[in-house]
Amino acid sequence: CQSCQIGEGRFRCLTCSGDQTFCHSCVVKAHQFLPFHKVQEWIGKCFQDKSLEELGFVWHMGHGGQPCPFSDDPQTWEDMPLDTEASF
């Protein structure tokens, strides 16, 4: 991983500039505020499309990207599927 220098760099982002590869945790962390970027995973022979949702990404809207501090169960409000094909 070119970010933490510890994990295996199996992920890349086609939307970000550069040729960086990230480990699982770093690619999710790097995209905390970039939920619509196109991520791919190296599967041994080629890169395959992978959604941030598949990697465990949860988009917390508001509160600086953190879960709502006033909710006992943040999943109640925030466990909604992320539609990366949405048109605005």
Image (cartoon, rainbow, N blue to C red):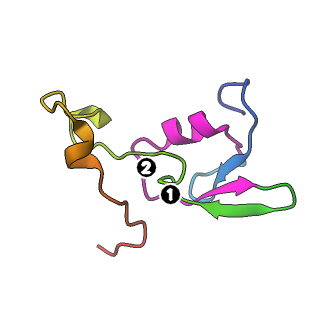
Asked if marks 2 and 1 touch (Cβ < 8 Å), the reply is yes
State how many labels appear. 2
The vertical placement of 54 against 71, above or below, is below
Rendered-image quadrant of the N terminus: top right
Instruction: Name the spot of residue 49 as percent of width and height, x first.
Output: 64, 64
Residue type at tag 2:
Leu
Instruction: Please tell me the numbered disc located at residue 37.
Output: 1
Q: Is residue 31 magenta?
A: yes
* Rendering quarter of residue 87: bottom left
* Rendering quarter of residue 45: bottom right
Q: Say left or right for 8 vs 78.
A: right
User: Secondary structure beneath disc 1?
Assistant: loop
Give the distance between the C-alpha atoms of the residues marked 2 and 1, in whole angstroms. 6 Å
Q: Say left or right for 8 vs 26.
A: right
**Residue appearing at x 48%, y 45% in the figure:** 56
Q: Is residue 34 magenta?
A: yes
Give the residue at mark 2: 34
Instruction: Please tell me the numbered disc located at residue 85.
Output: none
**Residue appearing at x 53%, y 58% in the figure:** 51
Write the start and end of the magenta stretch as one range: 20-42
Instruction: Name the spot of residue 71 as percent of width and height, x first.
Output: 15, 33
Q: Say left or right for 57 vs 88.
A: right
**Residue appearing at x 35%, y 60% in the figure:** 81
Q: Residue furthest right?
A: 45
User: Secondary structure beneath disc 2?
Assistant: loop
Task: Categorize mark 1 by other alpha carbons within 10 Å: few (<14), some (14-19), many (20+).
Answer: some
Residue type at tag 1:
His
Task: Categorize mark 2 by other alpha carbons within 10 Å: few (<14), some (14-19), many (20+).
Answer: some
